[in-house]
Amino acid sequence: AKQHGKSHFEVFDPTMHESARARLDLECELRRSIDRDELYLCYQPIVEMASGALIGFEALARWNHPRLGQVSPEQFIPIAEDTGLIGVIGSKLLRMACRQMETWKASEKFAAELSVNFNLSAKQMSQNGLADDIRDSLSESSLSPDCLRVEITESAIMENLHEGVELLCDLRESGIRVEIDDFGTGYSSLALLHKLPLDVLKIDRSFIRKMLTSTENIAIVRTILTLADSLNLDVIAEGIETEEQRGQLLEMGCELGQGYLFSKPLDCVQIEHLICQACTW
Ligand code: C2E
Ligand code: CA
Ligand code: CA
Ligand code: CA
C-alpha cells in the first residue's frame, strides 16, 4: 500500500509502474511489427482548392497490431524515435510509398504530376546517409525525384539547424522538394526562414481550426500567406474541415489544402477507386 507522507515510497506508485511497463510492451511489439509487416501507409489527398483537383498525397504511417488493433502514429512514432527504430521503419515505409507510386504511375488514369509527401522526423535527419537512402528508394522504383516531397517540422529543423540545412540543400539539389510541416507552431525567426532551402509551408491545422472564430488566428494565417508570398513559397493549409474554411482561405489567396473536407487518409485500394473515378472536390 501507498505510504502517504513518505515520498520515497511513492516512487513505486503502481500506476506509474504500469504505464512504464505498457510503454515497454509497446516498444517490444513495435520492434516485432517491422518483420511481421504490420506497418503500412495511408494516403491523404492534397487538393487545389479552387478547382477541386487532386495534386498529390501525404503518406501517413499506420500500425495494425493483431491484438491491440490500430495504434495511432501519435503514439508509436515517438517510441520509434526514442528507440532509434525510426531509421528502419522510416526507410521501410519510404520504399513502400515509392513502390506504391510506381504501381499507380503505371495506370493511365494516374496523372503524371501527382506526387507523394513523406514525413521525416528529427531523429532521421541526423542519421548518416539519409539523403542517399531517399535517392536509392526513388531509383529502385524508377521514380523521378519530383514524385517525392519530404515534410519536416519547423522544430525538427531548428533542433538541428546545421545538419538540417545541409540535408535540405542536398535533397533539393537532387530535385526533391522540401516542405515545412506544422508551420507556425515552432519558433523560427523570419531572418532564418529566408535562409532555409524550402519549397512549401504547411500551415498547422491548429490555426485553421480556430480561424473562423478568432481574429487572431485569421491574422496569423494572413501573415503566413504574406510571408510565403515574399519568399516565393507555396502554401498548403492543413486540417480543412468545412467549406467556410476553404472559402476563407481561397479569399486570402491560399491555393492548396488538405483535410477531412476533401478526404480522410485512405488506404491504397481506396486511393485507386478515387483515381479511377477521377474524383474532384
Ligand atoms: P502530421 O504530419 O501533421 O499529419 C497530419 C495529421 O492530421 C494526420 O494524423 C492526419 O490524419 C490528420 N488530419 C488530416 N486532416 C485532418 C482534419 O481535417 N482534421 C483533423 N482533426 N485531423 C486531420 P495522423 O495520421 O494520426 O498522424 C499524426 C502524426 O504522426 C503526423 O502529423 C506526423 O507527425 C506523424 N506521422 C505519421 N506518419 C508518419 C511517418 O510516416 N513518419 C513520421 N516521421 N511521422 C509520421
Ligand atoms: Ca506531415
Ligand atoms: Ca502537419
Ligand atoms: Ca502534426
Image (spheres, rainbow, N blue to C red):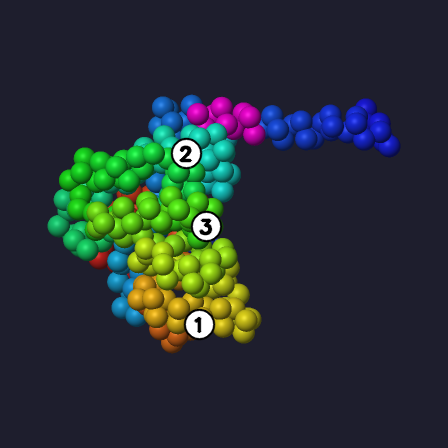
Q: Secondary structure at mark 2?
A: helix
**Which of the two residues, 127 or 72, is positioned nearer the viewer here?**
127
**Which of the two residues, 131 or 87, is positioned nearer the viewer here?**
131
The secondary structure that dominates the magenta segment is helix
Which residue lies under the disc numbered 2? 86
Quarter where residue 41 is shown: top left
**Amino acid type for the residue under numbered disc 3:** Met
Look at discs 3 and 2 and give the one toward the viewer: 3
Q: Is mark 2 within 8 Å of ligand 1?
A: yes
Kindly identify the residue that appears in the image at 40 percent across and 60 percent down: 193
Range of magenta residues: 23-31
- The spot of residue 199 in percent (x, y) is 30, 58
Which residue lies under the disc numbered 1? 222
Kindly identify the residue that appears in the image at 32 percent across and 64 percent down: 233
- The spot of residue 268 in percent (x, y) is 29, 43
The CA distance from mark 1 to mark 3 is 23 Å
Q: Quadrant of the C terminus?
A: bottom left
Q: Secondary structure at mark 3?
A: helix
Name the disc covering residue 158, or none: 3
Q: Secondary structure at mark 1?
A: helix
